[in-house]
Image (cartoon, rainbow, N blue to C red):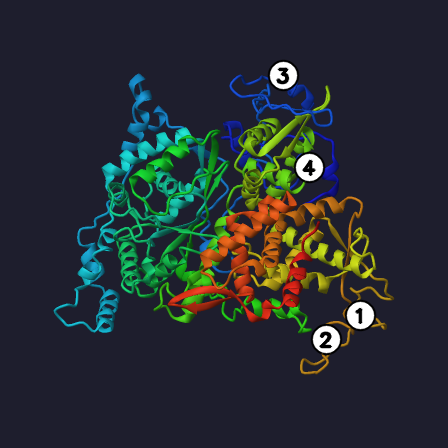
Amino acid sequence: MFCCSALHSDDPVTLPSLACQPSRAQTRCAREATWRPTRPPRAPPAPPPSVLWRKVQQDPLKAQLRLALGGGVWLSWAVKIKKKLKPVAPFLGKFRPTVGQCCHQCAPRSLGWKLLKTSPSLGFQDLLAVNETHTRYRGWLVRRVCCVLFVGGRRVYPSPASDRADRVCSSARVQKAAAAGRFEQRAPQHLALTTRGRAAHVLPVIDTCISPILLRVCSWVLLRLLGSVFCSVQVNLSQLAALHKASEMEAPLVFVSVQQCGLDYALLPLVLLCHNLRVPYTICPLWMGGSWLGSVLQRLGVILRPGSSGTEQDPEEDRLYGPLMTSLVAELLREGQSVSVTLARGSGRGGQWLARVWEAVRDGSVPDVTLVPVSIAYDRPPDPGLPRQGRGLAFLQYVLSLLRGGQRGSVRIHFAQAFSLKEMCDTGRCCVDGARPLQELLLPAILKNRSDAVYGQKSVSWVLAPPHCPELPHPERQFCTALVQHLLHSTTSCTAVMSTGLVSCLLLHKHRRGVRLSELCRDSSWLLEEVLFRNRDVGFGGSLWSVVHHALSLLRPSLVMALLPPGREPLIAPRPCPAALLSLAQHCDILTHTFILEAVGACAVSSMLSEVAHCGGGGGGEMEFDVALCQEELTEKALQLCYLLPLGHHPPCQSPLSFALDAVDSLVRCGILVMEELPRDRPVCDFLRTQGTLRWSATDEQDHSDSDCEEQDTRRYRLSQPSQCPDLLLFLCSMLSVQLRALSWAIEGLQTILTPVPESECVSQVHAHLCDRARQDRQRFESSSVEVAREAVRTLTDLGVLEEVVEKDSIALGISPLFQQAANRDKLHKFICQFLCS
C-alpha cells in the first residue's frame, strides 16, 4: 500500500529480476515456498549515483548541447553508465503475480477450470532468441539456418476454403437480406442480380484461407524484421500452457485484444505459430484495393476490409455486407477455426465482430465459444500507424519507417484466462439493462436543479452503433455492449507495466520540474512495489540502475538532463515541447488504469478540499488539508467523476456506486485517509441494551432493527499525515488531469466551434483549440492529443452538450440549445474544474 514516508526515504533499493528465467536452485526452493504477501527485506546499499556517472563518454557523431542554467551544464545523451548487472532475488518470494484471471461473477465455472496456475518451473521465453536447441538438429550449419528450420518444423492446421463461399451465400441470413434488397430496388426480374453477383466485391474476403508454405515463409521474414525493431518479444510460458489446455476443449477460440499499433495484427499469429497453436483468422480494418499484397495477406488468414474502385465507403452501410460477414464468422467457427478481433478503446470499433460471434452461438452454428483476452505492451511503441488504406507501396513505407525507428525496446505479450461466452450470457451478470444517458445522471448535479442524486449504469450505446448488426434485438445488443466493455477492462487489466511507463509517470506527474537521478531511482522502486501489490505484472527486470538507464535511453528524445556543479548528480526533466510531453503521456496510460481507484478518490478529496477553501473566505487561497470529510459527500464526488471515465476502467458487472465506494476505501487502505471516531456515550459495537440483554422481536414488526442504534452517524475522514500527504495526493490527482483538463478546455472553446459539422470535423476543431490553449499556457501539452480530443467530443455528446443533427442524409454535431447559454457552459466548466488540482 501507499506509504507517505516512502516518498522521502533515502534508503537505496534494488529492483527485482522478474523477467529472468529462474535457475534450478530457485525452482527447487520455490516448490517448497508458500505465498506470503509481505514486503521483502531491505537490499544492501547500492553505490552512490555520483560514482556511476563519473565516467562520461562523448559521442563524436552528435553535437554537444551545452547551456548555462544556474551553474549547470546540459549533457549530451551519449552518456554510458559503467556498471555490472547483478541479478537479485525475485520481489514477492519465488512466485510472480497471477494476472488475467476471468471475472468470478460473470464466469464462475470458467474460473473453476483453473487454467492459470502459478508454476515456478515456467518463466518467460524470448520469441526472437531462436537457436539450434529449438530444432531437432545440431551442428555448425544448423546454427546459421536454425530460424528456417524452426519455422519449418512448426505445425500448421489445415484451413480448407473450397466451398465456403457457396455455404455463406446460401445461408438463410444472406438469402433473406438479398431478397429484401431486391424488393427495395423494385427492379425487373431480368435486372435483379443474384446473391453472388451483388456480393462480388465481398467474395475475395470470404475466400480468405491460410497457406502453410506462405505462412512459414512470412513468419521467418517477420522474425527477422522484429529482430531489427525490438530487442526481445517475451511471452509467458505458464499462460501458453493454459492456452494449450483451452485449445483442447471443443469450443473454438476467439482472441480479443486492444489495438496499440499496426504490429499487433502480426505478433499474435506469430506467437501462436511458434508454439504449435492454431493460427487464427485475423480481422483487420485495412483496405488494400485488390493489390498483390492484399492477395498475400488473404492467404495468411487476414480478413481485410472490402472495397471497390478506391472508394472509402463504410462497408457496414451495405445491407448485404453484415449478413455475409455474420455467416462467414459462423462458418469459420463451425470449421473449428480461431478468430482474432481487435477493439478500439476510444470508439469501441470492432464490437460488431463480437456481436457476430454471439449470433453464431445464439443460432446454434457452434455450441459455445471460448474468449481469450490478449494484451500487448511495448517499451516504446512504433510511432507510425498502420495505413487504413493503400497499396503495397504504402505498406512497404510503413515497414521501412519501423526499421528507422532508432532505439530498440522490448515487447511483453500476456494471454488472460479463457472463459465461456455462453456462460457469461447465462449468468446474466454481464449486462447494462436499465442504463441511463450520461446527461440524465450528471446534468442535475451540474445545473443544480435537482437535490437528490441519480444512480445507475451509464449508457454507451455508441459502442455498437445502430448501423452495425441492425437485426440484433435490443436485449442482445445490450449484452454485446456489456461484453465489449468487459473485454476492454479484462485486456487492459492484464497488460504489463513497462519500465518506460514507470519512469514517464514519475517525470510527468510527480517530478515535472526535474528530479535528481538517485531520487528518481528511489521513487521508481516505490512505484514498482505499489504496482506489484496491486497484482499487476511488469515487463522488465534486473538491477535498479540498469532498469532506470534502459528507460531513460528509450525516452531520451523526450527528456533533458543537466549536470549540476562538480560533485553533484544529474538532474532529469521532461522536455517542454508538445511531442515530448505527448510521448510521455502515452506511456502513462497503463499506470493511470492501475491506480484508477486511488486517482478517483484523490480527485474527490481534492474537490472537497477546494470547496472548504472557498467556503472559508480564502478566495482561492492556500488549501487547508487538516479538515474532516463526510463519507456521503466524498462518495458522491467519486461517483460523479466515475461517470466521466472512459471505457475499460471498470467492468460493467460492477455498479458505479460500488466503484465509488471502493475508491474511497482505497484511500483508507493506502494510508491517505483515516476514519475519525466520534465521541459517544456508548461504543457503536455495543448492541446490548443498558440492562445487558437483547430484546428478541418478531420478524413482522414494523420497527424491526438488528441493533439498538436509533441513528446512524455518518462517517468522517481526515488526512492521515497532512504534512506529507499533499505530495501523494497531487501525484494521484495528476493522473486524471490529462483528460479532465482537455475536457475543460473543450468546454471553453465551444463558442468557437462552427456547428453543425460532422463528427470528424468537430474532433479536428476541438483538437486545434486544445493545441492553441496548450501553447498559450506553454505547458500541459499532454492534454492536446487527437485521442484526448476525440474522447472529449464523445463525453460532450453523452452529456447532451453536443447533439446529433440530421442534414442532407448525414449526421452532424451541433451545440444543444441548453448549452448555447453562457451561464450553463460556465456551470459545466466549474463542475469539471473542481476535480482539477492545480
Q: Which label was assigned to residue 55?
A: 3
- The residues tagged by marks 3 and 2 sit, at their Cα atoms, a distance apart of 74 Å
Mark 2 belongs to which amino acid? Answer: Ser
Mark before the other along the chain sequence, 3 or 2: 3
Regarding residue 47, the answer to whether it shows in the image is no
Q: Quadrant of residue 296?
A: top left
Mark 1 belongs to which amino acid? Answer: Leu
From the image, tell me which residue sits under label 4: 513
Mark before the other along the chain sequence, 2 or 4: 4
Q: Dot 4, how many residues are within 10 Å of its Cα: few (below 14), some (14-19), or many (20+)?
A: some
From the image, tell me which residue sits under label 2: 705
Q: Position of residue 319 (x, y in %)?
A: 29, 65
Of residues 814 and 800, the one drawn nearer to the viewer in this rendering? 814
SS of the residue under disc 4:
loop
Of residues 791 and 67, the one drawn nearer to the viewer in this rendering? 67
Quarter of the figure with the N terminus: top right
